[in-house]
Amino acid sequence: MQKIEEEKLKEIEGGFSAVVGIAIVSAIMFISGIIEGIVSPRGCHNE
């Protein structure tokens, strides 16, 4: 097994990015909103 140089380790990309995290959280919030709308529907409030 070869040792990987530190420079090559810094070039390796992957893992968890902020964009993926934001997309996952947005999808969860959207789906929970749909489920809440189905479970407890409320009419429009015209005030």
Image (cartoon, rainbow, N blue to C red):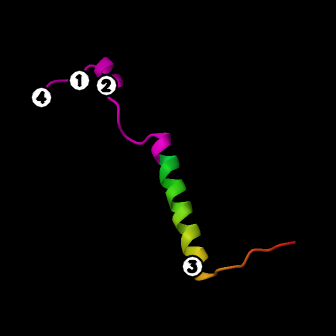
What is the CA distance from the residue labelled 4 to the residue labelled 1? 9 Å
As drawn, the label of residue 1 is 4
As drawn, the label of residue 4 is 1
Along the line of sight, which residue is nearer the eye, 44 or 34?
A: 44
Mark nearest the camera among 3 and 1 is 3
Q: Amino acid at mark 2?
A: Leu
Q: Secondary structure at mark 2?
A: helix
As drawn, the label of residue 9 is 2
The reply to whether dot 2 and dot 1 touch (C-beta < 8 Å) is yes
Residue at the limit of the structure toward the front, as seen here: 46
What is the CA distance from the residue labelled 2 to the residue labelled 1? 7 Å
What is the CA distance from the residue labelled 3 to the residue labelled 1? 53 Å
- Give percent across and percent down for residue 35: 54, 74
- Give percent across and percent down for residue 15: 37, 40
Q: In the rendered view of the protein, which quadrant contains the C terminus?
A: bottom right
What is the CA distance from the residue labelled 2 to the residue labelled 4? 15 Å
- Give percent across and percent down for residue 32: 55, 68
Q: Which portion, as a residue range, is magenta? A: 1-20
Sequence-wise first label, 3 or 2 = 2
Q: Is residue 19 magenta?
A: yes
Along the line of sight, which residue is nearer the eye, 38 or 21?
A: 38
Q: Residue at x 58, y 81 (%)?
A: 39
**Residue of label 3:** 38
Sequence-wise first label, 3 or 1 = 1
Mark nearest the camera among 3 and 4 is 3
